[in-house]
Image (tube, helix red, strand yellow):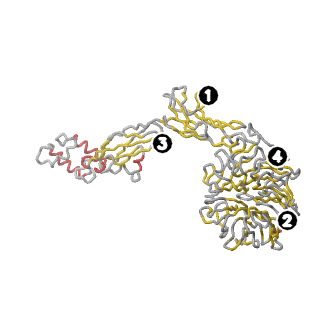
Amino acid sequence: MRTSNLSCSVAWLLALGVAGTAAAQCSPRWISGGETGGPGGIVYALTVWDPDGPGPKPSVLVVGGSFGSVAGLATGRIVAWDGSSWLALGSGIGANNVYALAVLPSGELVAGGDFVTAGGAPASRIAKWDGAAWTPLGAGVDNTVYALAVTSTGELIAGGMFLNAGGSPASRVARWTPSTQTWSVFGAGTNFTVNALAPLPAGDLVVGGNFTAAGGVSARFIAKWTNATSKWSAMGTSVMNNIVTSLAVLPGGQIVAGGYFTTASGFPANGIARWDGTDWQEMGAGGMNFGVYDLSVTPDGNLLAGGGFTVAGGPGGGVAANRIALWNTAISTWSPIGSGLDGSVNAVAVFHGEPIAGGNFLTSGTEFCPFFGHFGQPVAPTVRDHPADALVCANDQRPFSVSTSGSTPFTYQWQIETGPGNWADLSLDPIALPCGGSADAAGATTRQAGITIVPCPSVSTYKVRCVVTNACGTATSNPATITMNSNVAPTNPQSITACVGGTAHFTTTPSGIGPYRFYWHRDDVLIDALANPSAASGELVLSNLSTDDAGRFNCLVYNSCSGAWTNYASLDVLGASACCPADLNHDGFVDDLDFQIFAVAYDILDCADTSMPAGCPADLTGDGLVEDSDFSVFVVAYDVLLCP
């Protein structure tokens, strides 16, 4: 049971609560939690939470239940909703269920249920979230928590099936004091399950559930704890004849109980009754035709009720109200909230001025809103995230998506531009393009489509968009430009002859559109790009060459469409004698010492002369003579001095 401190206009809610409100056109109706869906399982609890109190962050609605994910988002039994999008609270709650939620004055959010972990750490049936991490409340409790409430002094009350809290006996109801981080008890507690809590002024407390005694006093299904005397008492004579599942306190102090009972203090009260300070009174002639599971009070004194009922106000003078209804305290009447829901409503609240329902339902009228819905005026769609431009290969399918705000359900239609200002609907079957190509889309009527284009011979860019429609209007996304890429075709590197100690550059230039990936190889072995980063570029640079660097080089080049090899190019590395023939004494310099050797050979002239040094190294032109032409070559090298 939760009570709400949310502002809500009675007149507005009543205006929306006309029986049989149609979901057609753009009229108020029940709406699901967003474009991508809602909780993947039953909802048991709702509460409003402001993550930073007086800070700039807006309030969110927190939802707890049996689900493990929401709209594809891993949440772990608890999630927040900002009015359009779902937000995870860390890794959430572990296995099992969240049945109750509350917010401490510190701003921390508390969850209770039958779980044993929160945020991946041990937390026995109860844990708190501070906006960054989940932590346990001491040793927790030893069995399921079904109800949470916060007192005016900031203490947390928990009710459920447990017999121990913080490691000490506590029969079904216990108090957590944040300032001392300790658990304490309410006397002997109750003899069976507590389902609902209603803190009162001065530390008093009303509990409802499946018990028949509290503190040893007979109290069938509902009891009051008086703080001043530290004693339990029954509320009325005989009290209820069946289980109490929910409690609320109206602004005037009247207590409202909901549940499976049909009498209260011996008087008819089907599913719901009001305590006037002395005895129980029915609410509307005949009450509900089935159980009430949750109650939520608005500040202007009205009451939302959710449950399994389909009639509110009794069979004779009641109104059709499918599982959710509004009680107007000013005129003491029940009103439906639109078409209601098709299954049980376990939790109710008001958020952003709209009634919220969570439970085990799937639809409202023809609207699909599984497990969670809000009732309000539908909003025309607005495209929030537009499809992105893409570089695409011919015949390849590429996904494009949109995200939309507004009221679900949405319909989608992806289109392709066939001429300036002309757009054609895409479908799974290919459509012919005027230029000679074709296009198709898998999921052409969903928010994410896989679009394939067979391009026209002379057209390299295309535009696609998505048209989103709901009952209130249409929105069109910005167009996304598709640029067609071609298979890569790299140019071939050229063979190189270089000298020892020199540098070699092999280059390739690919066709098509990048980005490109380059993989240079030497003798069919991949060159390590960590050792030589240029091996991952279009220009391979080999520095300080040695004769061991000689070999065959080629490159494998990829773009987004394909990969292709270049032809081989060879590298020959010449030794020092071949690269600096004028260095006649092989010391790396062409200087006066080499000139002396050259002068001796020049005087001899003929290489065939037996007095010529072996090999005739001074014959720099290779004509068999050491003469003026060789001298000219030598002078050039002499002027440079240093061999390459």
- Numbered badge on residue 515: 3
Counting residues from the start of the chain, the first of labels 2 and 3 encountered is 2
The one of 99 and 551 positioned closer to us in this rendering: 99
Crowd class of label 2 (few under 14; some 14 to 19; many from 20; radius 10 Å):
some
Element type where label 4 sits in the image: strand
- Residue carrying label 4: 319
| Contact flag, marks 1 and 4 (Cβ < 8 Å) | no
**In the rendered image, which quarter is residue 630 located in?**
top left
Q: What residue is shown at x 65% (from left), y 59% (from top)?
A: 97
Counting residues from the start of the chain, the first of labels 3 and 1 encountered is 1
- Residue carrying label 2: 237
Crowd class of label 4 (few under 14; some 14 to 19; many from 20; radius 10 Å):
many
Residue 256 coordinates in the image, percent (x, y): 82, 58
Element type where label 3 sits in the image: loop
Residue type, numbered disc 3? Pro
Q: CA distance from mark 4 to mark 3?
A: 67 Å
Q: Is residue 569 above or below residue 547?
A: above
**Residue 641 seen in the figure:** no
| Contact flag, marks 3 and 1 (Cβ < 8 Å) | no
Residue farthest left in this picture:
610
**Residue 350 seen in the figure:** yes
Q: CA distance from mark 1 to mark 4?
A: 52 Å
Q: Is residue 181 above or below residue 382?
A: below
Q: What residue is shown at x 71% (from left), y 58% (from top)?
A: 52
- Residue carrying label 1: 422
Residue type, numbered disc 1? Asn
Counting residues from the start of the chain, the first of labels 1 and 4 encountered is 4
- Which one is closest to the eye, mark 4 or mark 2? 2
**In the rendered image, which quarter is residue 377 located in?**
top right
Q: CA distance from mark 2 to mark 3?
A: 82 Å
Q: What residue is shown at x 71% (from left), y 49% (from top)?
A: 343
Residue 395 coordinates in the image, percent (x, y): 49, 35
